[in-house]
Image (cartoon, grey):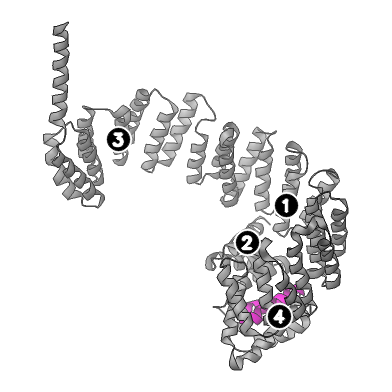
Amino acid sequence: MLKKNIFFLVIISLFVFSITVNALPPAETRTVERAQRYAELGRVEEAIKMIEPLLDRFPADLKLLTSAHRIYLEAKDYEKALKILDMQKKVSLNGGRLYLDYADIFLKMGKMESADSVFQVFLKERGGGSQAYREISQALLNNGYYAEATQVYLDGRERLMDSAQFALELGNLYQRQRQYANAAREYFRFMVYDTAMHRTGEAQIRFLINNADEIEELKQAFRDIIAGYPDNYQSYQFYAELLVREGQYDSAFENYKIVDSLHFRNGQHLYGFAEAALNDHEFEMAARTCRYLLEKYPEQGYRERAQLTLAAALIQLGQPDSAVLVYHQVIESSPSPKLKFDGEYLLGILFLQELYQSDSARYYFNRILNSPQMQPWAEMVKIKIAESYIIDNELDTADSIFLSINTNGLKNDMKEELLFKRAQIKFFKQEFTDARGLYNHLTGLYPRSMYVNDCLRKILIIDENQGTGVIDLDMYAAAERLLWQNEADSALTKLVDLSGRGNSNLSAMATFLAGEILYEKEEYQQALEYFNRVLESFEESFYTAESQKYLGDLYYYHLNDHEKAREAYRVILENYPNKVLYEYARRQLRKIESS
């Protein structure tokens, strides 16, 4: 027993001695670390000179060998890198990882067959599990072999006999190779089989729907998905979303009917589609969808919301009287105080901003103020009551109401609106110093407000038109006030006059606003002239991007010239970074391409 113990002690002592002999001393360790930093900084030759003498002295030190391997890779000296791996192999296979290092070098040398042979050894070493396939695929990706990495996953799926294995990885790979149809199939497979990661797959598919350029192939992929998963509502939903992207709203509507029949069966998906159509200015489709929903689900939860969307579509379709009736249905039948408020409030907005009947608007706003259930929205409604007095040209009354509003409970967007409209009142009254102060105050308090650009434009024209220019500023302020009061013809006369006065920012604003009025009056050829004048005479003005948008819309919706519309929208994509206009132009181009 004693001899046996002595024997083991001798073995352990020899092992420790071996490690000690091969281990790097502190000074040499610092040399290796310095060599690594040199290599990272591109000073590879210096790094090699520092590391090579140490390899003869410490041929079994893993830290040294690992560093030498990296440095030779930086130097692209693959033969020496292979020799380092041979030295390292005598010490440790690193759980099989060393085989991947061999394969990496072979790939860098373009020796695919050698790399593949090593991969097979690695698979055998690892037992052929899914993680081994992932590591091989990543080694290929690191060297730019996307098709081969894809094939590794496909082979792994076959050998593991799991059709859902590697679905997310394959989806990502296909997407990177712009094979969007295959990517969609894999993402859907991943979404269905890995319910815990459902939203990840869903997000990836929606990215493809919104960004892929091979639309026909992607449509075929979704048709295949529908055939494979006929009872899955999202297969139809994704296909419908792609149809919406193409502007094929009729086909999308039919698919949303199927979605509704497979999921919830309460109109939720139909309502979402109606809202999307409304936002895309497809007002006929929005109204049609809402009517279908209301007929199918006359008593269910989305009834009032569908009615509100229907009313909004009817307003845009030039049927305000029909919208009034729909709003009354919401007010009379909804059990929800919030939906009743929406009906009353939107009815007031309709009379205020579409019909310019300020007395009728105040009637509905005051009904809200007199309802105990609607008090949470009272201060918000007072903003609209004040606005109604601007329309009546009772500017002092409007301002006093604005000043009386308790802003503590208002959201920021309401506070911004209040402050902006107070500034507008001062501008309309031609009290430009006070107006400028309020515009400046708003931009300071709310630098991301939707009103900031308007405020900056007003500050600019006020500053530019002091002194002798104040006459033009007075005329412009009067034109804007008339426009707020629905006296478009009188406003247009003043704006046309200002449009021809030089090339100032004030003239640019007047020209653009004249174009907008003519557009609303359906005098499309004249509107086209004014928007073109903005682009030709005021190239540096705030209004060039918006004028370009109007050109596209005029050609597309009213002048039936899709080629010129396409050119106008493409200019927005190429020249203007405004995110909202950029996305709008992309949508319009998709509609043109699919028409």
Q: What segment is highlighted magenta in the picture? A: 508-532
Instruction: Pick the residue in front: 398 or 475.
Output: 398
Q: Which callout, 1 or 2, points to the residue nearer the camera? A: 2
- Disc 2: which residue: 584
Q: Give the labeled residue for mark 4.
A: 480
Identify the mark nearer the N-term, 4 or 2.
4
Comparing labels 1 and 3, the label whose residue is closer to the camera:
3
**Residue identifier under label 3:** 101
Q: Is residue 399 left or right of residue 501?
A: right
Vertical comparison of 585 with 298: above or below: below
Q: Where is residue 388 drawn, in percent x and y? A: 79, 73
Element at label 4: helix
Residue farthest to the bottom, as pictured: 468
Q: Label 3 crowding class (10 Å Cα cut-off): few <14, some 14-19, many 20+?
A: some
Q: Amino acid at mark 3?
A: Asp
Q: Looking at the image, which residue is at 49% across and 33% down?
A: 166
